[in-house]
Image: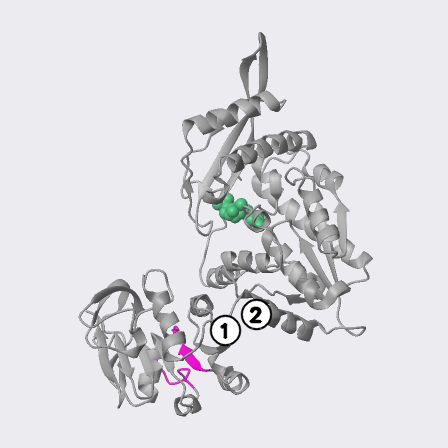
Amino acid sequence: SILIVDFGSQVTQLIARRVREAGVYSEIAPFNSAAEAFERMQPDGIILSGGPSSVNDEDAPLVPDAFYQAGVPILGICYGQQVMAKQLGGEITSHEMGEFGRAFVDIETTSTLFEGVWSKGERHQVWMSHGDKVTSLAPGFTTVGTSDGAPFAITADEERRFYGIQFHPEVVHTPDGAKLIGNFARHVCGLTGDWSMAEYRATKIAEIREQVGVGPDGGKVICGLSGGVDSSVAAILIHEAIGDQLTCVFVDHGLLRLNEREQVETLFREHYHIPLVVVEAEDRFMAGLAGQTDPEKKRKFIGGEFIAVFEEEAAKLGGADFLAQGTLYPDVIESVSFTGGPSVTIKSHHNVGGLPERMNMALVEPLRELFKDEVRDLGRELGLDDKFVGRHPFPGPGLAIRIPGEVTKERCDILRKADAIYLDEIRNAGLYDAIWQAFAVLLPVKTVGVMGDARTYDSVCALRAVTSTDGMTADIFPFDASFLTGCATRIVNEVKGINRVVYDYTSKPPGTIEWE
Ligand code: XMP
């Protein structure tokens, strides 16, 4: 295994992910508990992450000295390189000329670190982000690569198998970075690369059992299902760990897609036999949404009401000790980096964030280290089919934010039908997986049409489809005109209440993906 020592970099989890991709088990430990982690794991290699500190600060975080004596290979990245250099007798200079963004390294000699990946004399693109840099090597180290801003961009003590790199191999902007990390894990540390999601599953199950406790004295866990991939995978994993100590709650607020509730019921009750409470709350949500046209007020109402319904159900179940959530790593990074500065609220994203404090429950979040595509892998590992794990994201406030203006049951029904036809066409054309998210929007605009020999006066439906990697930015999906014509014809013919269809050509920014 590999121990990753975290010095506070924003991208430490990406290092773990690259190691996982190489088929090697890793654990991340904060620098101040790294010594215990080392004792427990007896790792075959250590990676030191980057971080915001300067090694020349008085209280700079350090690597436990014992790590340098353990005879285990070490790869220091950015701050990790600097702290290793400093602790082993080199020098680091602060804030002369930083290097941020794309840079190039020249490979001066061969090194085990990149054997089979990079060769002497080559020049490679890498991603740099540093103010400090190594200016004098520690005894035993030599330079194996340089860049314009970092004369010691890559350093190595081949005998002790200590490597320091100033650039970040874990980010995609270092095109060969994943290969370099894989090479460190397999070639330098001699690991076989046969770790898989099956083992992640086993490890997490053990952790959940440990956290919650099993048997008559074990804790009770409640999990809010959204019908999406993340909460479903979390619930299935937790159920595997603690069985019926878990109860899932699915709130049907009437803002779901066609047949969504039935799909969740079948999946959980019939397929996985997981205790599931379905709360019929459509009337209550529709009543609260009546007359409401302001997007933020709609969102706030739905978020608040969701929490209220969930709390009531938890009380009916006699309370619970833990709340399970399908929080992913990107949710964690965003919420951390957003606390740093003033950021404008574009939309109040609805999640169950307020719940744990209000209900005084500890969290069980078994997906916190994973990225979306890894959750999909884990879902497949747990027996979910590709169609389910590949589902497009669906927002918490559901169809309410796809019906600008007042939301009514009747308008939800109209939109559900149009949306189902659109997605059906997309699947039939084999385009579903090429699209990040596709959905229909029902506009509060009526236009005149003619059907048969009669005049119609009905609503406009807008179709949206975008590509994206993380939902933060998006491009529109460029359908063929004939595909859109086919969708428009079917929707107008089959859905009473819609007589015109338009396509949304706005990227994000300046648009957002949802309409509200
Ligand atoms: P926007 O509309 O902000 O959406 O460009 C970006 C992504 O987030 C989803 N989204 C939400 N997801 N609760 C969620 O769980 C929400 O309140 C919410 N609002 C937007 C949206 O569907 C897209 O994938």
Q: Which residue lies under the disc numbered 2?
A: 199
Give the answer, above or below, for where 168 lies relative to 67.
above
* Residue type highlighted by circle 1: Tyr
Quarter occupied by residue 314: bottom right
10 Å neighbourhood of mark 1: few (<14), some, or many (≥20)? many
Q: Which disc number belongs to residue 495?
A: none
At x 37% / y 85%, what residue is drawn?
58
Residue 201 screen position, x and y as percent: 60, 67
Q: Is residue 219 left or right of residue 34?
A: right
Query: Which of disc 1 and disc 2 is earlier in sequence?
Result: 1
Give the answer, above or below, for where 383 lies relative to 69.
above
Residue 53 seen in the current view: no
The region drawn magenta spans: 44-63
* Residue type highlighted by circle 2: Glu
Q: Which residue lies under the disc numbered 1?
A: 25
Residue 376 seen in the current view: yes
Badge 1 marks a residue whose secondary structure is loop
Q: Are marks 2 and 1 in contact (CB under 8 Å)?
A: yes
Residue 297 lies in magenta, yes or no?
Answer: no
